[in-house]
Image (tube, rainbow, N blue to C red):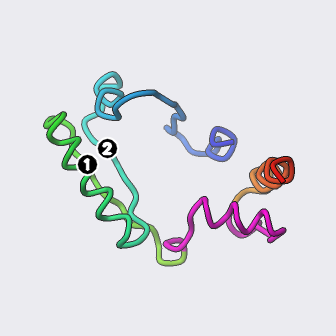
């Protein structure tokens, strides 16, 4: 779904990995990790992770980005809960994501 959702963006690569993110970054020759902070509650966890990553790999920097205020409250947990209750998610995710999410949640119920 990520590949389909980002198909129109040049230079976006979707990948997955197991293990430490700093090891993955080194394999990809990346020097920067970009992490999102939605709410202040994210900061403590992300800051702790960034400091640990810095200790493990001092050559890899972490940069934090904040979303627009209009998106700061969103979380996958919240959208899954709304979908399970039949909410219209068209203002939050592409239609194919909404359909797949509702199909998956319907099977789980």
Q: Residue furthest bottom?
A: 69
At 75% from the left and 51% from the top, the residue drawn is: 97
| CA distance separating discs 2 and 1 | 5 Å
Report the residue at 84% width, 68% height from top.
Answer: 86
Image quarter of residue 92: bottom right
Q: Is residue 16 above or below residue 64?
A: above
Whether residue 84 is in magenta: the answer is: yes
Task: Say whether disc 2 or disc 1 marks the residue closer to the N-terminus.
Answer: 2
Residues under numbered marks 2 and 1 in contact, where contact means CB atoms less than 8 Å apart: yes
Q: Residues within 10 Å of mark 2 (few under 14, many from 20)?
A: some
Q: Secondary structure at mark 2?
A: strand
Across and down, in percent, residue 68 comes to 47, 73
Q: Nearer the viewer, residue 13 or 17?
A: 17
Part of the protein shown in magenta: 71-92
Which secondary structure lies at badge 1? strand
**Relative to residue 60, is residue 2 drawn left or right?**
right
* Residue sitting at x 36%, y 28%: 24
Comparing 30 with 38, the one in front is 38
Q: What mark, if any, has residue 33 been given in the picture?
A: 2
The reply to whether the magenta stretch includes residue 97 is: no
Residue 17, percent from left and from top: 46, 28
User: Which image quarter is the C terminus in?
Assistant: bottom right
Q: Is residue 89 left or right of residue 35?
A: right
Q: Quadrant of the N terminus?
A: top right
User: Please, which residue is most extreme toward the top here?
Assistant: 27
Query: Mark 1 highlights which residue?
Result: 62
Give above or below for 100 relative to 25: below
């Amino acid at each position: 779904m990520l590949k389909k959702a980002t198909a129109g963006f040049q230079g976006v690569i979707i990948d997955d990995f197991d293990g430490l993110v700093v090891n993955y970054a080194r394999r990809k020759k990346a020097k920067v990790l970009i992490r999102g902070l939605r709410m202040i509650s994210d900061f403590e966890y992300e800051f702790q992770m960034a400091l640990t990553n810095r200790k493990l790999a001092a050559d890899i920097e972490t940069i934090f980005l904040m979303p627009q205020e209009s998106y700061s409250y969103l979380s996958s947990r919240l959208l899954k809960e709304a979908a399970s209750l039949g909410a219209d998610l068209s203002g939050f995710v592409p239609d194919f994501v909404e359909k797949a999410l509702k199909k998956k949640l319907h099977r789980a119920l």
